Image (cartoon, rainbow, N blue to C red):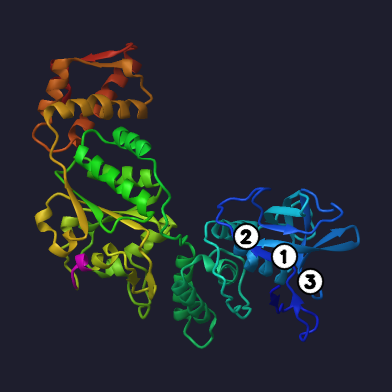
Amino acid sequence: MPVFDFKDTPDENTQAVCTYETFQSTANYTSPNRPIMLIDNPEGVLQHHTSGMFVNPIKRTAFEYQEGSDKISFDILQIDSRFTSLYKWLGENHIRVRLSGAVTEDGYAVYKIREQAFGNSHKLSSSDGFLQYMIERLLASDPPSDRLVEDEEDLEGDDMKLTSIQSITDFIACAGNTMPENIQVWARRNLSVAKSNEVSPEERRHAQRALSTMMGINWRNNYFASIDPVEARKILDRELYGMEKVKQRIIETIIQINRTHTLPAYGLLIVGPAGTGKSQVAYAVAKILKLSWTTLDMSSINDPEQLTGSSRVYANAKPGIIMEAFERAGESKLVFIINELDKANEGKGNGNPADVLLTLLDNLGFTDNYMECMIPTDGVYPIATANDKSKISAPIMSRFAVIEIPDYTPEEKKVIFTRFSLPKILKRMSMKPEEIQITEDGLDTIVDLCSGTSGVRDIEQVAEHIAANALYQIEVDHLDHVVYDSSKIMALID
């Protein structure tokens, strides 16, 4: 049985015996059958909602339940290994909790822990949201390794807020093992800077901001569960018209993920004229992979520092766009959509922004100058779009599987207008399909009017113009429906 030294043990020479055993779990939710912990409950005293505190009275690790003026301690028998630090933090800080649990033959199976306000057995504390945040992060993490990590020295802090020093300290103590090891070391170092009186206020502020950014990201492992190829194909057919080469490449990627449970070494580069739906491909992939997505518009970036962040030596320093994208997504596993990659070589500042992308695309880790830490990128799937691949450097091209999308034919544009563009507009305007009728010659005229441009953005604008005009006639002239032939289309568009 493991032995721990608890700080609130009455005699510093007395060791508190750990009464519980840990068990490994990868479940991302809790229930009576998947509890956080099991508490001894021989008399059935502990019922569904039970209030009290976790304590470490002489040589025992227990939950203290108060009934009237009497306090009864119940030994803790088992704990999910991911929650041992949280249990200790709750006990050391004397936090009153309400447990939701089920009475079983083995004991009281706790599957929910809420923080209660002192002096009120029914009201939850204002800090309960932070506790639930930590519990969610712990449930999303993998079981910790068997090695023991020495506890950090207790640090005092300010009020409980998600970005406060105290909340960061508590998070590291309770859920620090949900982060990669190098980030755990980095977090402890930056926490020391944020608490130090030997550095400037500017340095403390930067350290706290960097910690707040890093703590807000759920650092998941790079394991990917299997994806149903049939369901993936349905999503692709629903979101994209044609593009059979693109769909085939995406399905191949899914089959590869199902075999290896990791992302492919190469991302996708979609090349084609403007308006052909290149970005829509990326959104469809994110939906299939069930990942958050973020966009990086290379046409607006002219200095590498915009991507890598600025050094903390400057008062106005801040993280770069890539790090901010991780922070917005709140996840380390995401689809990174890089728009207009062919504009990446047109930097006007100190260096080439395209060079910065190489480290991101290699999935070997990305270093932000402000964070001063290597950020794991093995859960990032890059999908880039470009109009002209000849403007993309060879090193960048070698990081992608390239798929070229030709412009749509007139017949394809007709199908896209009738099956995708117009129905989408009608749904947005709360109109019924039967309220607009377009004749065959009217459809030919729409396509002819949009023949001078690539892609389908023009026909989508025409669809919106037609729908708005029809809605006006239906509402003002009280028509049941509006028919558009070639002459009406010409009069409306011209």
Look at mark 1 in the image and give the residue it sits on: 95
**Amino acid bearing label 2:** Leu
Look at mark 2 in the image and give the residue it sits on: 131
Say which quadrant the N terminus sits in: bottom right
Q: Is residue 156 above or below residue 33?
A: below
Residue 30 placement (x, y as % from top left):
62, 50
**Amino acid bearing label 3:** Arg
Is 82 on the left-hand or right-hand side of 67?
left
Q: Are marks 2 and 1 in contact (CB under 8 Å)?
A: yes
Q: SS for tag 1? A: loop
Q: Residues within 10 Å of mark 2 (few under 14, many from 20)?
A: many
Q: Which residues are magenta?
A: 351-355
Q: SS for tag 2? A: helix
Q: From the image, state whether disc 3 or disc 2 is nearer to you.
A: 3
CA separation in Å, label 3 and label 2:
24 Å
Residue 443's image quarter? top left
Residue with the most extreme right position: 69
Residue depicted at x 21% and y 56%: 400
Look at mark 3 in the image and give the residue it sits on: 60
